[in-house]
Image (cartoon, rainbow, N blue to C red):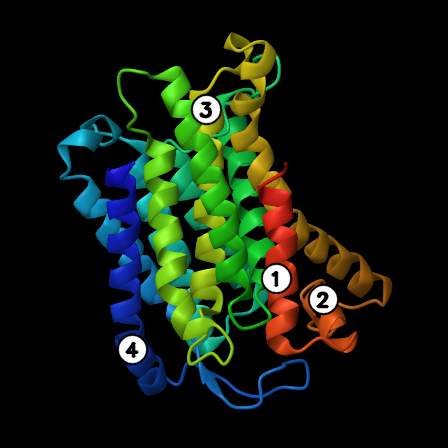
Amino acid sequence: MRVYLLIMAIAAVATYLLVPVVKRLALLLGAITQVRERDVHTLPIPRLGGVAMYLGFSAAILIASRIPYLSGVFPRGSAIWGVLLGAGFMCLVGAIDDVWELVWYAKLAGEVLAAGTMAWQGVQLVTVPFMGLTVGSTRLTIFITTIVMVIVANAVNFVDGLDGLAAGIIGIGSTAFFLYTYVLTRATSPGSYSSLAATIVAALIGVCVGFLPHNFNPATIFMGDSGAMQLGLVSAASTIIVTGQIDPGSFDGSRALPAFMPILLPLAVLLLPLTDMMMAIVRRTRKGLSPTHPDRMHMHHRLLAAGHSHRRAVLVMYLWAAVASFPV
């Protein structure tokens, strides 16, 4: 456990220290979110925070690769390098959009490239943890994995509408996911507690913790698409890695629940952003608008309209995420 706490700390400190540097870069490049009719902030805020998040994540992973305890997680051809590469591509696509605002189809193409790269490098939804069901051929596996990761990345991006909301929700869900994954690793590998998924999620938690002091209301920087889509992609990747490593058929009785929890937890915590995204798509298409057309009808907008303050609305959604992530 101490090794994973060290990874979290490295990611948190690196991200926290890099945010002011990236903020200056955002100001130089003009990556600034102006006050628009649909927004809730009242002053222009620089975005591009996702770049600091990726650098913090990369620092934690690279240092982790030098720790002997985790040597089994970093063999040649390990999927963790695919996660790092795919997250880098997604961050780059988001950063370009943060600066120049890409048209939706160019942005989607970049998202597919990032997710496809990760899938090509071994992060694949090969098995579904239900009676040993397999997805299918290699091409179908890569295709389905890519689609799943793009959907999750966009779901997190949809929910990133209030200061600290996306980082907090993902941080809460990732903490629950880490704890269950760690317990599952202890149950399945009593000789070694090193885990690829736990390593990735530990770094992800650290990134969220390091970014939140700059992003919680009143935010001094936004993570932008470079951060939100990156968080979604890495969250999806860690879940997919677990489903490929665990055979729940080998568990019975009371031990079956821990085997399924790492799959059920991300679905539970992402229920809010996924539901919000689906409602937005249905709502906009019914009006004859593009699914990407902005409006003020997201869940967080409804909480604000109900009379909650900015911070209280965020804390309410944190509570929802915690309830979903830590079922009693």
* Mark identifier at residue 20: 4
Residue 289, quarter of picture: bottom right
Amino acid found under the numbered disc labelled 3: Gly
N-term-proximal mark, 3 vs 2:
3
Q: Which mark is residue 180?
A: none
Tag 4 near tag 1, CB within 8 Å:
no
Query: Label 2 amino acid?
Result: His
| Amino acid carrying mark 4 in the image | Pro
In the image, what residue occupies the spot 74% across and 61% down?
280
Q: Amino acid at mark 1?
A: Val
N-terminal of the pair, mark 4 or mark 2, is 4
Q: Position of residue 125 (x, y in %)?
A: 50, 29
For numbered disc 2, what is the local secondary structure? loop
Q: Residue at x 48, y 65 (%)?
A: 225
Q: As displayed, is residue 188 above or below residue 205?
A: above
Marks 3 and 4, how far apart in space?
Answer: 38 Å
Q: Give the mark, 1 or 3, whose residue is nearer the N terminus.
A: 1
Image location (x, y in percent) of residue 181: 44, 31
In this rendering, the answer to whether 172 lies above or below 21 is: above
Residue to which mark 3 is pinned: 244
Residue, far front: 328
Q: Which residue is mark 2?
A: 298
Could you tell me if the residues under marks 3 and 4 are in contact, i.e. CB atoms within 8 Å? Answer: no
Q: Which residue is mark 1?
A: 159
Please tell me how crowded label 1 is: few (under 14), some (14-19), or many (20+) other residues with Cα within 10 Å.
Answer: many
- The structure residue drawn at horizontal position 29% and vertical position 83%, both measured from the top left corner, is 24
